[in-house]
Amino acid sequence: MQDTQADQPRVEDHEIILEPSPEVTSEIYAEIDRARNLVHDGKFEEATEICKTLLARDELSMAAAAKLTFILRMLGQDEAADQIQSRILSEIRGKTHLFKNPQAAMFPAAMALIDFGEAEEAEKLIWKALEAEPDTQIVVVEAAALLVQLDRRDAAYQVAKEYLERAAAFDAAVHFSVVFSHIKYPEAARMCLEIAKKNCKTKPQRAKLDYFLASNGVPVAELDQHSMVVELFDKFADVYDQQLGALGNNGPSLIYTALEELNLSKTQSRRVLDAGCGTGLCAGFLRDYAKELTGVDLSIKMLEVSRDKGTYDFLARTDLSVAATYPEGKFDLVVCADVFVYFGDLRTVLGNLQKALNPGGLLIATVEDENDDTVTTGFKLYPSGRYKHSDVYMQQTLQAVGFSKPRLMKHARLRNEFGLPVLGTVFAVQKPALVFN
């Protein structure tokens, strides 16, 4: 363990801000996870240097700074951790009366307070946020999620019920069913899905409803995955970055870290495909490797958000399970961050991506970990609306579609849900450069 008095990281004089841009947040959380992994590997000096660098940044959010305190305590740097915690609590308490925006101020501050065990103060901010915007769906969703994290389940249920009765909103009802399924509150989840059923008006909505009914163990005739994904992400596009930030999304960060660990040259010499690009959270760091950066997604709304950011050379609507919809030509690098969780059997998608690569090309992707030994298929749909895949299934399927043995396969946190980490795997595999019959 690191000497508690030696070479303590310091909090600089500049202000710790509430919430930087999503791109900066993704990069910072990648470094935080890298530091955490270094601590687990016993590389304390390297982890300390990362903490120092992060603490000196101009765009360090309160939420990220709070996460850093846990790493510093793992390093035995209690003095530095206490200093950061005191600084953050002072900032929050001194400015609480100025907080007006739930997402930009109240919720990030509440999350930091929860991390520090200040439950009563955190709950006051949550109720203040609800009072400020009681009919804004994303605010109600985040408030309910944070109340769950505080183990205030009955309060979260009442917040959801009152909002859904007022709004009669299909998407909100489905989302709240996910929240309540996760905390094993099936009566509340069924209430939400019943409200969703009453407000289901289109074929894509029916596909989405069936998907979540199935994820809660309700038999359905057939899942229309294509329509479900379009419905889910078209509705989600405008708030996607904010929602993932609130969940501590780590998918893009894991891709970033994998690229660093593979030590690929940053020569901007490759044709790079961001498969399932969403709103372009990976685009910033992929630029270092790409002479041509293409983003594809099934959701037109997501592609429109990426287009407005201006980070890709080409964008195209693509169904990863249909090879005919892929862009022309071969790629040298393909990344898929948080994409495979919306597929069960991955043989078709992985086979398509293998064919889209040049010989020697790399695929880097994430999946959620399936650790239930009773799941004999290797994958399972969960109430979150996402699939989990086992290591054995992934290795066998990657080999079956023609990839070499993984160059990298590492377990890590993908994001948080209701205060608990969702564990996943980032893997990197290569298409063989030579094939001998």
Image (tube, rainbow, N blue to C red):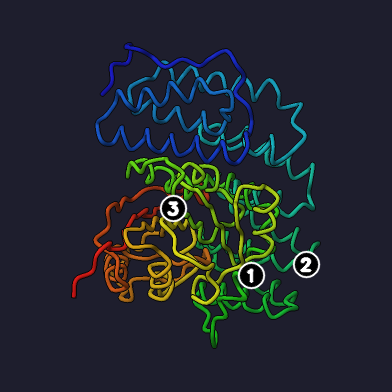
Picture coordinates of residue 319 (x, y %)?
55, 72
Image quadrant assignment for residue 74: top left
Seen at 51% across and 28% down, the residue is: 65
- Classify mark 3: helix, strand or loop: strand
Where does label 1 land, which residue?
230
Q: Which residue lies under the disc numbered 2?
A: 168
Circle 2: element type: loop
Number of numbered discs on residues: 3
Which amino acid does the dot numbered 1 rest on?
Val
**Residue at screen point 36% across, 54% down:** 425
- Amino acid residing under circle 2: Ala
Residue picked out by circle 3 = 422
Within 10 Å of the Cα at label 3, are there few (<14), some (14-19), or many (20+) other Cα atoms? some
> Sequence-wise, which precedes: disc 3 or disc 1?
1
Hey, what amino acid is under mark 3? Val
Viewer-side label of 3, 1: 1
Residue 304 coordinates in the image, percent (x, y): 69, 57
Q: Earlier in the sequence, mark 2 or mark 1?
A: 2
Q: In the shown orientation, is residue 207 left or right of residue 198? A: left
Give the quadrant of the C terminus: bottom left
Q: Position of residue 238 (x, y in %)?
A: 70, 54
- Any part of residue 155 in sight: no
Asked which secondary structure carries label 1, the reply is helix
The N terminus sits in image quarter: top left
